[in-house]
Image (cartoon, grey):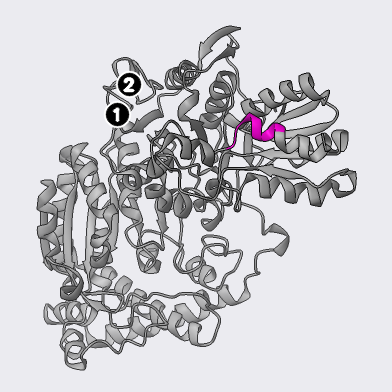
């Protein structure tokens, strides 16, 4: 990775952190409703993987913890925030909310709220790519707990059976909502579970963005070459509860302190400083700049945007003026 | 017009749509090499290949979700779920994804999948192979539900469903695949909304759909012959959305209504049609509407018990006689 790319990546990760922290505040201010699942602590996963993918070609799909993946994949952060503010200018026109960020023109195929739901959807997107003989791949991010759904096994089986170009990324943050992985899952190393389907897999430190980038590059090369699916497990940690309604009382403070010492942004920053690519002042300026951008552009845009018209509540249920509904008669 | 069997009509629609668009594919359990449990895809595997006529593992939620995901990129999957009882396993993907993705993405994504499945009670298949689930599907916004009563409808509804940009659930019936009927020789697309007058009449409307249309027609003949009552039979081939105008128009002509459904009465087609009658044309009624439904029991294995649990043409006749006091 070039130095300029590393510095850009650091800025993107810091932007993601500040964006999510501002979401927390906006939720407390009651500008954001419903459920809100935040990403701080896990930034190296989305950024390392997607840095290795082709922004102009590939498809991305994920769960409800989806803001950061969407932004990294090209969604306008102002429109993501506007979606959280339930505005017409939001990426999903205020109909989706935090868990349903969609930005289809950038091939961000959505956030889905049923744990494990995207597994087969990702395989299906890959099937469509294969039918069209495309060189694109589909990248599916899900948490460790999703692997206990039937869709995990059903989808891995089909993905390998038909050698579909799908890259499954497991963000293993050690908890399924509030239940620790060893209390819910017989085999805690997730990368081992896919060997049952003869799918190549690896486990990597999800806090080190450069290691993630390297592991993802290898995986993407495999998938894009037509050899079928790949599964990458990234060991990570979410700093906040599962969602805003989660008091986060089930984790030991010592465990949290241990993970905070392995913060993906701080570790990456310190490495860039040590290598002489960045000064502490530059980093502070970067942070100030990001906070200004979020407040003056992102939040301002969300605040000032209009809500969807109530008269349109029944729009988007079915296709509009589809002639085949009348048997092809216009 | 040529008289063909129901399964042949479904097969013809598959064949034509696969030939028409390279993005159409067929997937499901045993649809490929075997040619489909009810022969609805017979020969298509050899003609179009395993990439487009796909034998899936027995993973209903998984392969339904895979089809839905493929449809996001313009693929047109026709998904066969071998028996509607197994569709329970795919409800997550059908309801949570296919039916909602257009709405929750603000119109950016759509899931133009067709899901075909035989529902209904056949002969002594027991509780877990005799489900009638149309009422479950028709209760979900974002999904179209149609249910053919004839080979012509089976052919034309599948053709339109493949072309339509909404997810469409097609409810077929295990006992109807060998039923014969005339199908136009030329290509034909059946509307996905509306209803048909299967038999005109003036005294009472019998509302049916899928297999119960045939019970209604038999009952209408018996009522005409033995009691001089001329029943109109309305075929509700579209269950979602239901044809409010068609229901209103018929009841406004006959002033009496009987709704005939193979399913249990709770939260069903009968209840819904009755509600529409109340909302649309209550003051046209000369008698309280009646529904003829299955008993509220899991379907038994024993033949006599099974027969007792289900409605038939005689039950329709009895309901009308009671209504008229004859």
Q: Nearer the viewer, residue A311 or A206?
A: A311
Give the left or right position of residue B128, taking residue A249 as reference: right
Q: Position of residue B48 (x, y in %)?
A: 33, 19
Q: Is residue B236 visible?
A: no
* Viewer can see residue B204: yes
* Rendered image: mark on residue B35: 2
Cβ–Cβ below 8 Å for labels 2 and 1?
A: yes
| Residue beneath the point at 41% across and 77% down | A19
Quarter of the figure with residue B163: top right
Q: Is residue A3 above or below residue B25?
A: below
Q: Which residue is mark 1?
A: B30
> What kind of secondary structure does the magenta stretch mostly adopt?
helix
Residue A312 left/right relative to B307: right
- Residue shown at 60% from the left, 46% from the top: A318
Q: What's the residue at 52%, 80% (across, down)?
A: A296
Q: Position of residue A127 (x, y in %)?
A: 31, 38
Q: Position of residue B206 (x, y in %)?
A: 73, 33
Q: Residue at x 11, y 63 (%)?
A: A203
Does dot 1 land on a helix, a strand or a loop? loop
> Is B263 left, or right, of B205 in this rendering?
left
Q: Earlier in the sequence, mark 2 or mark 1?
A: 1
Q: Quadrant of the C terminus of chain A?
A: top right
Q: Give the SS element for disc 2.
A: loop
Task: Let me know if residue A167 is in the magenta part.
Answer: no
Query: Can you tell which quarter of the image residue A82 is in?
Result: bottom right
Q: Chain of mark 2?
A: B
Q: Over which residues does the magenta segment extend?
A: B311-317
Residues behind callouts 2 and 1 on a single chain: yes
Residue B231, given in percent of the width and then of the height, sits at: 78, 28
**How far apart are labels 2 and 1 at the CA level?**
6 Å
| Residue sitting nearer the eye, A45 or B72 | B72
Is residue A91 placed above or below A20 in the rendered structure? Answer: above
């Amino acid at each position: 990775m070039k130095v300029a790319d590393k510095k850009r990546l650091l800025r993107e990760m810091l932007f993601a952190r500040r964006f999510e922290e501002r979401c927390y505040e906006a939720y407390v201010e009651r500008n954001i409703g419903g459920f809100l699942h935040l990403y701080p602590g896990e930034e190296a996963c989305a950024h390392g993987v997607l840095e290795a993918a082709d922004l102009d070609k590939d498809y991305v799909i994920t769960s409800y913890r989806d803001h950061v993946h969407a932004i990294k994949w090209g969604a306008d952060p102002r429109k993501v925030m506007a979606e959280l503010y339930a505005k017409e200018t939001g990426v999903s026109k205020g109909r989706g909310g935090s868990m349903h960020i969609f930005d289809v023109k950038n091939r961000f195929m959505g956030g889905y709220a049923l744990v494990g739901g995207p597994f087969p959807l990702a395989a299906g997107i890959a099937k469509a790519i294969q039918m069209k003989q495309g060189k694109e791949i589909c990248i599916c991010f899900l948490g460790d707990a999703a692997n206990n759904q039937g869709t995990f096994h059903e989808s891995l089986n089909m993905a390998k059976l038909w050698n579909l170009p799908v890259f499954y990324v497991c963000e293993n943050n050690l908890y399924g909502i509030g239940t620790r992985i060893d209390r819910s899952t017989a085999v805690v190393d997730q990368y081992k579970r896919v060997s049952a389907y003869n799918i190549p897999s690896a486990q990597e430190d999800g806090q080190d963005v450069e290691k993630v980038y390297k592991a993802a590059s290898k995986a993407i090369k495999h998938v894009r070459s037509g050899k079928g699916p790949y599964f990458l497990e990234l060991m990570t940690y979410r700093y906040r509860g599962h969602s805003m309604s989660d008091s986060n009382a089930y984790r030991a403070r010592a465990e949290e302190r241990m993970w905070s010492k392995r913060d993906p942004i701080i570790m990456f920053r310190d490495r860039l400083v040590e290598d002489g690519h960045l000064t502490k002042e530059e980093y502070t300026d970067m942070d100030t700049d990001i906070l200004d951008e979020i407040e003056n552009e992102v939040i301002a845009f969300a605040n000032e945007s209009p809500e969807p018209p109530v008269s349109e509540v029944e729009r988007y249920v079915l296709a509009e003026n589809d002639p085949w509904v009348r048997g092809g008669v216009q | 017009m040529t008289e063909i069997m129901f399964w042949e009509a479904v097969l013809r629609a598959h064949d034509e749509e696969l030939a028409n668009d390279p993005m159409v594919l067929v997937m499901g359990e045993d649809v490929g090499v075997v040619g489909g449990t009810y022969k609805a895809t017979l020969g298509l595997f050899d003609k179009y290949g395993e990439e487009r006529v796909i034998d899936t593992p027995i993973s209903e939620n998984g392969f339904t979700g895979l089809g839905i995901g493929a449809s996001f990129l313009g693929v047109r999957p026709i998904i066969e779920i071998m028996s509607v009882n197994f569709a329970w396993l795919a409800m997550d993907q059908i309801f949570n994804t296919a039916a909602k993705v257009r709405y929750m993405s603000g119109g950016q994504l759509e899931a133009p999948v067709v899901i075909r499945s035989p529902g209904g009670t056949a002969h002594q298949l027991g509780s877990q192979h005799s489900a009638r689930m149309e009422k479950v599907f028709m209760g979900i916004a974002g999904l179209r539900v149609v249910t053919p009563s004839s080979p012509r409808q089976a052919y034309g509804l599948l053709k339109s469903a493949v072309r339509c940009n909404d997810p469409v659930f097609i409810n077929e019936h295990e006992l109807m695949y060998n039923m014969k009927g005339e199908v136009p020789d030329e290509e034909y697309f059946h509307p996905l909304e509306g209803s048909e007058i299967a038999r005109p009449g003036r005294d009472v409307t019998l509302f049916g759909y899928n297999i119960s249309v045939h019970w209604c027609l038999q009952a209408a003949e018996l009522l005409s012959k033995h009691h001089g009552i001329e029943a109109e039979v309305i075929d509700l081939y579209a269950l979602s959305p239901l044809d409010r105008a068609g229901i209103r128009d018929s009841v406004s002509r006959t002033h009496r209504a009987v709704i005939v459904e193979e399913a249990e009465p709770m939260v069903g087609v009968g209840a819904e049609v009755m509600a529409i009658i109340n909302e649309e044309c209550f003051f046209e009624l000369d008698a309280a509407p009646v529904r003829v439904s299955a008993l509220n029991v899991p379907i038994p294995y024993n033949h006599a018990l099974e027969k007792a649990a289900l409605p038939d043409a005689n039950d329709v006749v009895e309901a009308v006689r009671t209504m008229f006091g004859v």
